[in-house]
């Protein structure tokens, strides 16, 4: 087999597999009609994702599943909005403080800085704080 034939065949197989993936049934979040997390993010957008599962990709190529368990509002101040996201994850997959790549079927991909926030009935908790000028 010549190199050109191999590359043409491999490219066709890759294209076919990607089309197959895009024709698959919608993921859990997509089926619920959640809006993508894009543009200026606020508390309201994340509230729709409470109890949704997110894949979190660490730099060492490890994946963890976190669930958004709470969205809390901070102290109101003029021209300033604060809120925090609380995620729960498995005790067997602890994450340190740092920036992680998040992925959800409806929200798409985005990055968040997480800090460990203790342990509770749902596992290990992590917090992402937002402080936005309005």
Image (cartoon, rainbow, N blue to C red):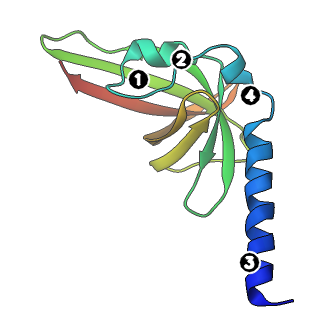
Q: Quadrant of the C terminus?
A: top left
For residue 97, above or below residue 40 = below
Residues at discs 3 and 1 in contact (Cβ within 8 Å): no
Residue that badge 4 annotates: 27
In the image, which is nearer the foreground, mark 3 or mark 4?
3
Estimate the x, y position of residue 42 in percent, counting from the top left: 36, 19
Residues at discs 2 and 1 in contact (Cβ within 8 Å): yes
Relative to 113, 20 lies left or right: right
Mark sitting on residue 84: 1
Residue visible at 57% across and 55% down?
58
Mark 3–mark 1 Cα distance, whole angstroms, equals: 48 Å
Residue that badge 2 annotates: 70
Residue that badge 3 annotates: 7
Residues at discs 3 and 2 in contact (Cβ within 8 Å): no
Relative to 19, 43 lies left or right: left
The quarter of the picture where residue 29 lies is: top right
The quarter of the picture where residue 11 lies is: bottom right
Relative to 90, 77 lies left or right: left
Mark 3–mark 4 Cα distance, whole angstroms, equals: 32 Å
User: What is the crowding at mark 1: few (fewer than 14 residues within 10 Å), some, or many (at least 20)?
Assistant: some
Look at the numbered disc 3 and give the secondary structure of its residue: helix
Look at the numbered disc 1 and give the secondary structure of its residue: strand
Estimate the x, y position of residue 120 in percent, counting from the top left: 65, 26
Mark 1–mark 4 Cα distance, whole angstroms, equals: 26 Å
Mark 3–mark 2 Cα distance, whole angstroms, equals: 48 Å
The answer to which of marks 3 and 2 sits earlier in the sequence is 3
The answer to which of marks 1 and 4 sits earlier in the sequence is 4
Estimate the x, y position of residue 30 in percent, counting from the top left: 67, 22
Residue visible at 52% across and 50% down?
96
Look at the numbered disc 2 and give the secondary structure of its residue: strand
């Amino acid at each position: 087999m010549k190199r050109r034939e191999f590359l043409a065949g491999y490219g066709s197989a890759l294209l076919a597999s990607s089309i197959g993936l895009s024709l698959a049934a919608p993921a859990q979040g997509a089926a619920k009609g959640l809006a993508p997390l894009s543009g200026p993010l606020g508390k309201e957008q994340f509230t729709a994702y409470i109890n949704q599962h997110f894949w979190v990709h660490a730099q060492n190529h490890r994946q963890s599943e976190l669930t958004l368990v709470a969205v809390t509002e901070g102290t109101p101040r003029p021209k300033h909005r604060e809120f925090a996201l609380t995620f729960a994850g498995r005790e067997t997959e602890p994450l340190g403080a740092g920036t992680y790549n998040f992925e959800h079927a409806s929200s798409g991909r985005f990055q968040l800085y997480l800090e460990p926030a203790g342990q509770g009935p749902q596992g290990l908790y992590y917090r992402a704080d937002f402080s936005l000028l309005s």
